[in-house]
Image (cartoon, grey):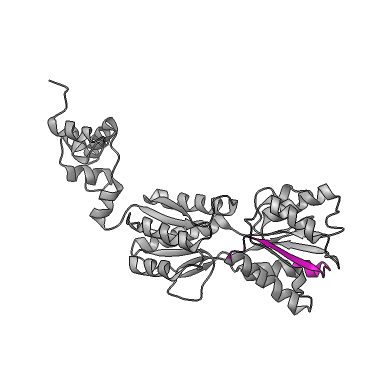
Amino acid sequence: MSSRPSSSMARSRATGRVTLSDVAQLAGVSPITVSRALRGERAVDPDLIARVKDAALKLGYVPDPAARALASRHGSHVAVLIPMLSNALFVDLLEAVQRTLRPAGYQTLIGITHYDQGEEEQLLREQLQHRPAGLLVTGFDRNDATRALMAGSGVPCVHLMELSDDASIYTVGLSQTRAAAALTQHLLAQGYRRIAFAAAQLDPRTLQRRDGWRTEMAAHGLHDTTLEWLNPAPSSLAVGGQMFAQIIGQNPPVDAIFFCNDDLAQGALLAALRLGVAVPERVAIAGFNDLTGSDQMLPPLTTVRTPRADVGTAAAGMLLALMQGKEPERTSVDVGFEVIVRGST
């Protein structure tokens, strides 16, 4: 028997893509049977599934997600919009999302917004063209056009990292304001009074932390606008070191600095070592998010632990229920936070 492919297979190979029909021809079944077999439907005989999968493997067949989306009105992927990948906070979250969605047959399509509302809108327009099965978006700070796209798409959506009292919105996160207030309460309880708040990036969650700090300081009659150090630059160790060098020279002097993110605080601790500033004897330093390495700093960094993996797992689980047409047990899940006290305070 000749090993030459048939003319139909030759034509499909000429396009550079193996088709469902090619697999069906090699397996000796219909294309619809191939489709059902590759989806793992229980009604298909196991021996037939094995034959189809063997044919697909030999031919190097890869399913066309666009065709599948058209056939089912939605795809097998979830669009995830996050602000940045340079921060370990979102890496931890994404890994948890993928661990939850992949066993259920969903892949993630990641979009990076860079905290830019226009960029988020464009990313969402592009991703909706691929008919995602669901959406995971960060926070609530977006323009009206993006909100309209989300509402009009009919695609299930879960918001990450923040909470909402609106029962029609699905969200998993924590109160950034309460978490910042709790850390400020810790510093006050330690006897610190001139507590500066140092922030970079200045995204909505950062400003919510500032509000938590403000509230506690004002409640003790200690709020002073000169204690607020706000830098719009992206958050980093380098910026943290630069901010520390500026704040430590403030007069009257501060006795503690609450940095809005651990990378800033880590940079401040390194700067303190270089400048010979004793921590916490001269000034206490605290951070937020308990990023990798904070417990290894000298001294170890006091911070707020935010359970990013828990956010990812719970949000992906909530979205799975919505994509399956089920109503989640709760529309808003508060994963909480924990103040981690270490040697820097």
Q: Is residue 106 above or below residue 26?
A: below
- The reply to whether the magenta stretch includes residue 7 is no
Residue 213 at what x, y percent from top left? Answer: 70, 70
- The reply to whether the magenta stretch includes residue 195 is yes
Q: Quadrant of the C terminus?
A: bottom right
Residue sitting nearer the eye, 87 or 40: 87
Residue situated furthest top in the rendering: 1
Residue 97 at what x, y percent from top left? Answer: 47, 53
Residue sitting nearer the eye, 62 or 228: 228
Q: In the rendered image, which quarter is residue 232 located in?
A: bottom right
Residue 197 at what x, y percent from top left? Answer: 73, 66
Position of 204 with respect to 332 (left or right) is right
Position of 115 with respect to 245 (left or right) is left
| Residue occupying the point 32% across, 57% down | 131
The magenta stretch is: 186-203
Residue 301 can be seen, yes or no: no
Residue sitting nearer the eye, 75 or 152: 152
| Residue occupying the point 59% across, 52% down | 87
Q: In the rendered image, which quarter is residue 173 located in?
A: bottom right
Position of 97 with respect to 279 (left or right) is left
Q: Is residue 55 above or below residue 130?
A: above
Residue 243 at what x, y percent from top left? Answer: 74, 57
Residue 2 can be seen, yes or no: yes
Q: Quadrant of the N terminus?
A: top left
Disc tally is 0
| Residue occupying the point 59% across, 65% down | 205
